[in-house]
Amino acid sequence: MIEKTDFLIIGSGIAGLSYALKVAQFGKVTIVTKKQIQKTNTALAQGGVAAVFSKIDSFDLHIKDTLDAGDGLCNKEVVEMVVKDGPARIKELVKQGANFNKQGDGKYDFSLGQEGGHSAKRIVYAHDLTGKEIEETLVKNVERNENITILEDHIAVNLITFSSSIRSGLVVTQHENICCGAYVLNNKTGKIETHYAGITLLATGGASKVYLYTSNPDIATGDGIAMAYRAGASVANLEFVQFHPTCLFHPQAKNFLISEAVRGEGAVLIDSNGRRFMADYTPDKELACRDKVARAIDSELKKTGADAVFLDITHKDPDFVKNRFPNIYSKCLEYGIDMTKDPIPVVPAAHYMCGGVATDLNGKTDIQRLYAVGETACTGLHGANRLASNSLLEALVYSHRAYQSSIEEFKSIGNKVTVTLDQWDETDTTDSDEAIVVSHNWDEIRRLMWNYVGIVRSDKRLQRAFRRIQNIQQEINEYYWGFKVTSDLIELRNLATVAELIIQSALMRKESRGLHYNIGYPQKDDLNWLKPTILKKRL
């Protein structure tokens, strides 16, 4: 049986839901999400959305800060477009019901936070649960829209594409590669469904679960990037993995981020002796961009052999800290840390993919009728390093651009094209009796990436990682084609694909820039590497 929809959206974070609400005016929408609809990276975002609302701020300043953070690799046209469209998109969220902290009675008189790399206060936030506020607002609107179907506990396996001559009336037109939906595993039934769509949007988030230590939830396995690459789409800049400098270090804590906004409000980084060390690395100290702060902490840990450094905001008024960071305060208390009295132990962890599926200014990939938005995509906004709180901003702006573009493409499709889709074939496959293969390879990939492809890299480590990931890929492929597909196997396959792409990209770039630091090439090389790193599978 083939399920048909006008718009197939894979992912249910800010990018996917924003897009869904807009295209639902023009057709039937199906949202595929791996867990419950609110289990997303968006819901975990603490800091906020960067946008110009202050009279002492300007678009030019925000553009400059973004370009500076991106270390020469941002697409300036993209940066200008995103920054200038940002305020309108945030106002749109407010109209949809989102509540952000305010400093006055005006509808858009927002309180504005400060974060690293920003030359002015411009972070629109909802305490320290901004992502949760946005996600809940969008979910409420999506759930009451009759044109939107939500498929929870479903995971996309592969995109469905074809390259052929398409007959429309008496005219035959040659096409390169067209996406017409996806194969999707229904975790409730264990069956793989065939979903045909006029337009397919990838909004699956990032891939930081490829690393052993990460701020991301377990769902961040790079599904959209891996599927798009396998289908023949270009991917770009995957060597630029952002490690957030300050994740909570505690044996019982998992994936808990200490927001950049804490440093923005005056917290300082100290070692176990109470010495403030960031001035040794950069004049911007704790408010430097994330790549510099993460490398500084990594250096301190390697020099001292300590397990963690400490983030200290104990000099601020306790009531201010509790009110500004209620979620972080209560979470730290669960682990016996009172952040108004005790410095918080922190370490860097993989946080955000600046690379992804390559798109144009409208979120279009180089496969027709396939779009990518949010962390899944590489739009050119972030370059070699993302400026804090530009991620939710990018997702909002690009979901709007993708909506505008895909509606025109959808209208042009009409009823001209008839496609015959193959059903998923499970012939000669059996239920797995060796689940240890999946769990072992999952663990090995993540340790391999952390040890050899982390904050500081070398050609020797990267080459070793590349040889091992190729062997792991072979094991996974043998397993994949011999047994019935499960969600764990799908995620492992995607994780391995993204790991290999990150390693390949890192080996290609013979310089150090932004988030990519290779001890064999410690300087930037603008002559040869002031360009994106592009990978494309030969089909």
Image (tube, rainbow, N blue to C red):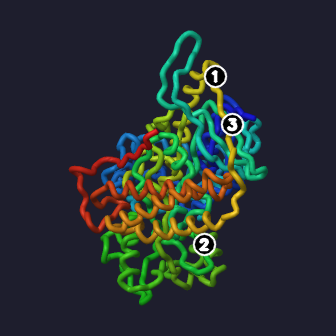
Compared to residue 343, the image places residue 441 above or below, namely above
Q: Identify residue for label 2.
A: 254
Give the percent coordinates (x, y) of residue 286. 40, 71
Outermost residue, bottom direction? 273
Q: Identify residue for label 1.
A: 418
Residue 354's disc is: none
Q: Amino acid at mark 2?
A: Lys
Q: Identify residue for label 3.
A: 423
- Badge 3: how crowded within 10 Å, few (<14), some, or many (20+)? few
Q: Is residue 311 left or right of residue 420?
A: left
Nearest-to-viewer mark from 2 and 3? 3
Mark 2 element type: loop
Q: Residues under labels 2 and 3: Cα distance? A: 39 Å
Residue at 27% over, 51% down: 529
Question: 51 and 192: which one is in front?
Answer: 192
**Tally of numbered tags:** 3
Give the percent coordinates (x, y) of residue 345. 51, 80
Q: Earlier in the sequence, mark 3 or mark 1?
A: 1
Q: Amino acid at mark 1?
A: Thr
Q: Quadrant of the N terminus?
A: top right
Residue at 45% over, 81% down: 309
- Badge 1: how crowded within 10 Å, few (<14), some, or many (20+)? few
Compared to residue 144, the image places residue 296 above or below, namely below
Give the percent coordinates (x, y) of residue 209. 55, 62
Mark 3 element type: loop
Q: Verify CB contact (< 8 Å) between mark 1 and mark 2.
A: no
Question: 112 and 33: which one is in front?
Answer: 33
